[in-house]
Amino acid sequence: MNRKQIVLWVVLLDFVALTAYAVYQQGYMAFYDNIFGSPIGVQLGVDLVLALGLALTWMWNDARERGAAFWPYLLVTCVLGTIGPLVYLIRRESQLAERAESPALARAGA
């Protein structure tokens, strides 16, 4: 596991813990109540939708180029937000690391 993968895992696990704590304290629907409850909440909600839209666009293009599945990450992103792109990045980095190790392993075995 390289440094980038470790950082992504730490960020993902910390963010999942924060999300779980927030949902435990307030409930899942409180997110929507807070977004539509004030102008700053609406601005934050629109900002989140735009940022996730950009991330989804990049993931879709990247998955298509690599021949990877996109739809599972789309669904996770729609339900859990940033967790979807983080999981996608972790999966992508592990696949890139496997490809990088593969030629070295083939040469060592030959």
Image (spheres, rainbow, N blue to C red):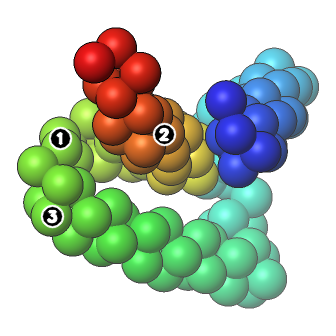
Q: Earlier in the sequence, mark 1 or mark 2?
A: 1
Name the mark on residue 65: 3
The answer to whether residue 70 is seen in the rendering is yes
Quickly name the residue at label 2.
97
Label 1 element class: loop
Q: Is 22 placed above or below 85 here?
A: above
Residue 58 image point, x, y percent: 34, 72
Question: Which residue corresponds to the image point at 30% horizontal and 73% vertical from the top-left?
Answer: 57
CA neighbours of label 3 inside 10 A, class few (<14), some (14 to 19), many (20+): few
Residue of label 1: 69
Element on which disc 3 rests? helix
Q: CA distance from mark 1 to mark 2?
A: 18 Å
What amino acid is at disc 3?
Answer: Glu
Question: Looking at numbered disc 2 in the image, what kind of residue is underneath it?
Answer: Ala
Q: Is residue 47 left or right of residue 4?
A: left
Q: Position of residue 17 (x, y in %)?
A: 83, 26
- Apparent side of residue 79 relative to residue 66 in the rendered image (left or right): right
Provide the secondary structure element on which disc 2 rests: helix
In the image, what residue type sits under mark 1? Ala
Comparing marks 3 and 2, which lies closer to the viewer? 2
